[in-house]
């Protein structure tokens, strides 16, 4: 097959990992193509705002398109090495911290400079909270967080897209069919039965493309290891209950090991004064949360996730997570919401019971139902214990009126064997971002792009 066009670098995926790779390589004289399965950023924003958009466009727009699955997320930049991915397996924490600072500077340059960084002050208050959490068998990991907000994050991504316009080739609404490797070397990609050749291939397919990516690298004989799958609920309660935490550290991670099963449970993606939203993963409806720079609700929401890593012979955690999500869709037609009191009483929530509750749901389209028919007993017991422990740190968290939305599932790709430059066993074939199973957030995905971009430039002597 003859190549339609030859490039120095082809980047699969225009999420933060792919974008930051492109930012590093722009204006260097290299020919670059970035291929994105979803819409370009302006079309994507228009689709998100268009109430009359076709359902198929709405579906894919949630997790595909310029900016990746995080484009319409809360826009939190986690400025710590403690969570957000596993890049410290490939570099020292000091080097990773330097890259995190560099990434933060880039986001600031493109429009985030005036957004507040939480966690730089009130150090003694943070220490007091950590001591209080420890007394409840919780580990509180504070982090410096720059909160962009969903709206500001979208503008930053637009600014990055405008900067790259004319400097690189961009193909949106385009899926890569296959990766081409021959004689132990990367050759390029096939798009609509046509070969686009390259010397360097950077694969950053995101969570949406993780299964496709696993299939491609499996055909190449590259070694994969299973990551854990995170399954749980999104919790919503009055914002004042968590203000003593969120006013100081905005995004905190609380880790708990259950007494019943010794499972690792954690909070994730806390959204003060935020909104619970539906997320569509290739037809599977799950739940997530957003908060904005210029719009607020009366509630705070966050996820409680139970991490489960499977052992032999089972090695398909993504399928397990999708099975749980599909069960919720079958029973609830989408996202299910339940009052904690109803769950504890062993009964489903009804619209009338939700209406009688003290917490007004920010996702009114969620179906009142019974999460005990969806989540395994083990997961439910873990979640109940976590809320009991959290109530000792933030009294009121374990209220009968607290709302639980389900299910929330984080589909992390199987992890590919990479060297310290994030390169596969095939020379000049790099794998980065959430789709490669090594990052779990905006900052580390972006830092992975920086790492690969700088490595390519070093190899080119530029």
Image: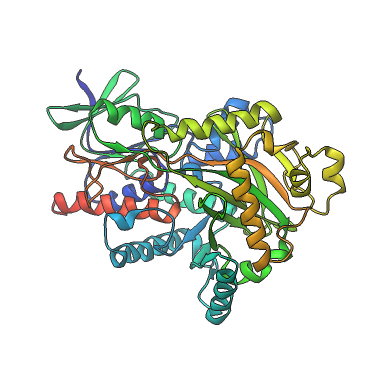
Q: Is residue 389 visible?
A: yes
Q: Position of residue 171 (x, y in %)?
A: 38, 33
**In which quadrant of the rendered view does residue 408 lie?**
top right
Q: Is residue 286 above or below residue 254?
A: above
Question: Which colour assignment does the render follow?
Answer: rainbow
Labels in figure, total: 0
Single out the residue that lies furthest toward the bottom: 124
Q: Position of residue 213 (x, y in %)?
A: 35, 32
Going 68% across and 38% down the picture, which residue do you hit? 371
221 vs 60, left or right, is: left
459 vs 364, left or right, is: left
109 vs 297, left or right, is: left
Single out the residue that lies furthest toward the front: 260
Going 69% across and 28% down the picture, which residue do you hit? 331
Going 47% across and 39% down the picture, which residue do you hit? 411
Closer-to-camera residue (437/456): 437
**Quadrant occupied by the N terminus:** top left
**In which quadrant of the rendered view does residue 109 lie?**
bottom left
Closer-to-camera residue (26/151): 151
Q: Is residue 289 visible?
A: no
Closer-to-camera residue (242/95): 242
Q: Is residue 357 above or below residue 77?
A: above
Q: Position of residue 64 (x, y in %)?
A: 49, 36
Closer-to-camera residue (253/206): 253
**Quadrant occupied by the C terminus:** bottom left
Q: Is residue 379 above or below residue 131?
A: above
Q: Position of residue 355 (x, y in %)?
A: 85, 45
């Amino acid at each position: 097959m003859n190549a339609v066009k030859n490039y120095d670098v082809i980047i699969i995926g225009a999420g933060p990992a792919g974008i930051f790779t492109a930012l590093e390589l722009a204006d260097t004289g290299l020919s670059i193509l970035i291929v994105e399965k979803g819409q370009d950023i302006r079309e994507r924003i228009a689709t998100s705002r268009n109430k009359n958009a076709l359902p198929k466009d709405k579906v894919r727009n949630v997790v595909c398109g310029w900016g990746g699955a995080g484009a319409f997320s809360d826009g939190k930049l986690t400025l710590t090495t403690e969570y957000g991915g596993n890049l410290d397996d490939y570099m020292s924490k000091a080097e990773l911290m330097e890259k995190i600072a560099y990434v933060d500077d880039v986001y600031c340059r493109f429009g985030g400079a005036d957004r507040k960084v939480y966690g730089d002050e009130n150090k003694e208050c943070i220490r007091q909270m950590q001591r209080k959490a420890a007394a409840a068998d919780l580990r509180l990991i504070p982090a410096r967080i720059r909160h962009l907000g969903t709206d500001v994050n979208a503008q930053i991504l637009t600014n990055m897209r405008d900067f790259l316009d004319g400097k690189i080739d961009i193909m949106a609404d385009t899926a890569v069919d296959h990766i081409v490797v021959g004689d132990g070397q990367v050759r390029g990609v096939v798009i609509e039965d046509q070969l686009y050749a390259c010397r360097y291939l950077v694969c950053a397919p995101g969570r949406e493309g993780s299964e496709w990516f696993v299939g491609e690298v499996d055909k190449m004989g590259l070694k994969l290891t299973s990551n854990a799958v995170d399954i749980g609920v999104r919790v919503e309660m009055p914002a004042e209950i968590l203000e003593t935490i969120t006013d100081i550290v905005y995004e905190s991670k609380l880790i708990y090991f259950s007494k019943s099963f010794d499972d690792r449970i954690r909070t994730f993606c806390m959204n003060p004064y935020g909104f619970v939203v539906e997320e569509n993963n290739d037809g599977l409806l799950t739940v997530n949360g957003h908060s904005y720079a210029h719009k607020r609700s009366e509630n705070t929401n966050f996820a409680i996730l139970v991490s489960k890593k499977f052992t032999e012979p089972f090695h398909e955690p993504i399928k397990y997570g999708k099975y749980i999500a599909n069960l919720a869709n079958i029973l609830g037609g989408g996202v299910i919401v339940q009052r904690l009191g109803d769950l504890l009483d062993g009964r489903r929530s009804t619209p009338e019971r939700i209406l009688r509750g003290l917490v007004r749901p920010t996702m009114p389209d969620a179906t009142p139902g019974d999460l005990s028919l969806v989540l395994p007993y083990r997961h439910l017991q873990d979640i109940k214990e976590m809320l009991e422990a959290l109530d000792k740190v933030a009294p009121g968290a374990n209220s009968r009126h607290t709302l639980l939305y389900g299910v929330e599932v984080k589909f992390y790709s199987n992890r590919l064997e990479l060297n310290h430059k994030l390169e596969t066993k095939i020379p000049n074939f790099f794998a980065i971002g959430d789709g490669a199973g090594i990052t779990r957030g905006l900052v580390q995905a972006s830092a992975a792009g920086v790492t690969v971009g700088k490595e390519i430039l070093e190899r080119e002597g530029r």
